Amino acid sequence: MNLNWDILTDHIPQLAVTVGALVVLWVLKWVIRKAARKVGAMLGKPRERVRHVRKVIGGGLNILFIVCIAMFWGVKPEHLAIALSSVVAFVGVAMFAQWSLVSSLTAGVIMFFSAPFHVGSRIHIIDKDCPLEATIEHIGAFYTHLRTTGDELVVLPNNLFLQKIVGVRGSGNAGE
């Protein structure tokens, strides 16, 4: 196999910047991982919830990295916009209600930073049509798992859970 080394030597600046950006991305993710652990410990949040927030932030950094590197390599913004809109359309069709998933993911991050309850908390959802008393078993990126007093598992999307009026009756352990 005969390699054409001229192609590589013509793109040395772009390759150097790409490698440098990969190093910066890795360092940023490392710093965010450490910061998320500290903030999670300060707020008394379980490791699982900290991990979910790190994944969301890391995914956003990855997308930003790909967009920046593509533009640096000469991809025109309008071509990038067409490609990104095509990907979003594909994902939206593939997942039916993509906006609902994004809102659940965002609600999971909001719940991480500001919710007065945690895994093990006994809660009461005040809803005229379907009141619910349960214990929080798991708070994930998209869903919250609740166990009723009748031992029924109720899985509630985070965006709907955040819209409900929730009374905290007591708490269990903060671990997950």
Image (cartoon, grey):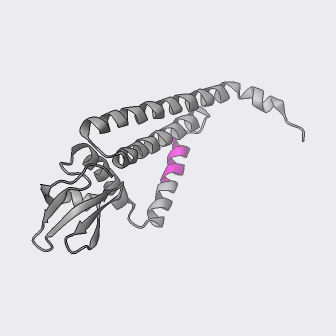
Q: For residue 120, what is the image quadrant?
A: bottom left
Of helix, strand and loop, which mostly describes the magenta segment?
helix
Q: Quadrant of the N terminus?
A: top right
Q: Taking 164 as reference, is 102 left or right?
A: right
Furthest-front residue in this view: 173
Residue 13: % across, % down: 66, 24
Residue 8: % across, % down: 76, 30
152 or 88: nearer the viewer: 152
* Vertical position of residue 156 compared to residue 175: above or below: below
Residue at point 27%, 58% (across, down): 159
52 or 136: nearer the viewer: 136
Residue at point 28%, 58% (across, down): 158
Residue at point 34%, 48% (across, down): 49
Q: Which portion, as a residue range, is magenta?
A: 77-85
Q: For residue 157, what is the image quadrant?
A: bottom left
Q: How many marks?
A: 0
Furthest-right residue in this view: 1
